[in-house]
Image: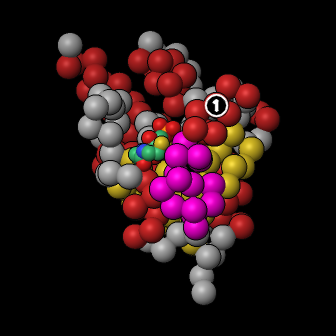
Amino acid sequence: MARIAVYPGSFDPPTLGHLDIVRRASGLFDQLVVAVGINRSKSPFLTVEERMQALACCTAEFPNVRVDSFSGLLIDYAKSVGACAVIRGLRAIADFEYEFQMAMANRGLCADIESVFLMTNWEHGYVSSGIVKEIAMFGGDYRNMVPECIVPIIERAVRAHRTDR
Ligand code: PNS
């Protein structure tokens, strides 16, 4: 039976750190579903469609990876795609507490789906979607932090947010 993993996140926007985790996880599982969590209470930088488009272009080189979105509980979504594992990336110690809570909560909801933590390459250890967003909005150079093919998607979003105000 194919071993399927879900890699969930906000991916707003995806970074080279996320892509590094995709590469590592895609080598460990038969299929990897990169899933954009839809959170209506957050006001996003990129729309869900833009985030999916960005993920699709930067993961195109991995034949066992597909991109999807979900709303509601992650664990329900993971069950619906037949996943045996949820992948999360870890950067610094600061990520641990939130990830620990989430993993325990998810285990309480479904003990059969394991949380698997992968560490990003050290060079991406400080990169986050929040930092990319902030640099992009203030006109700085963030291009060494994101996959090249998503730069036009970020630039379009920056223009849209500036004209919003
Ligand atoms: O990239 P992020 O913002 O850390 O991703 C968070 C995400 C989308 C994985 C998380 O918010 C999530 O799992 N949302 C779905 C709701 C859920 O299942 N909550 C219970 C587990 S804590």
SS of the residue at dot 1? helix
Q: Which residues are magenta?
A: 102-115
Mark 1 crowdedness (10 Å alpha carbons): few <14, some 14-19, many ≥20: few
Q: In the image, 22: left or right of 66?
A: right
Residue 87, horizontal then vertical, whole percent: 61, 54
Q: Please state the horizontal and vertical placement of residue 73, each as a whole percent of the image.
A: 38, 52
* Left or right of 10 in this view: 143: right
In the picture, residue 98 is in which quadrant? top right
Q: Residue at x 32, y 51 (%)?
A: 72
User: Looking at the image, is 90 positioned above or below residue 72?
Assistant: above
Q: Which of the 4 image quadrants contains residue 137? A: top left
The extreme left residue here reads 164
Q: Is residue 156 above or below residue 4?
A: above
Q: Is residue 129 visible?
A: yes
Residue 45 position (above or below residue 62) = above
Image position, residue 93 (x, y; %): 73, 28
- Please state which of residues 117 and 158 is positioned toward the viewer in this rendering: 117
For this orientation, the residue located farthest to the right is: 122
Return the residue at label 1.
97
Kind of residue at disc 1: Glu
**Looking at mark 1, is its residue's CB closer than 8 Å to ligand 1?**
no
Residue at 52% over, 46% down:
105
In which quadrant will I find the C terminus? top left
| Residue 104 within the magenta-colored segment of the rendering | yes
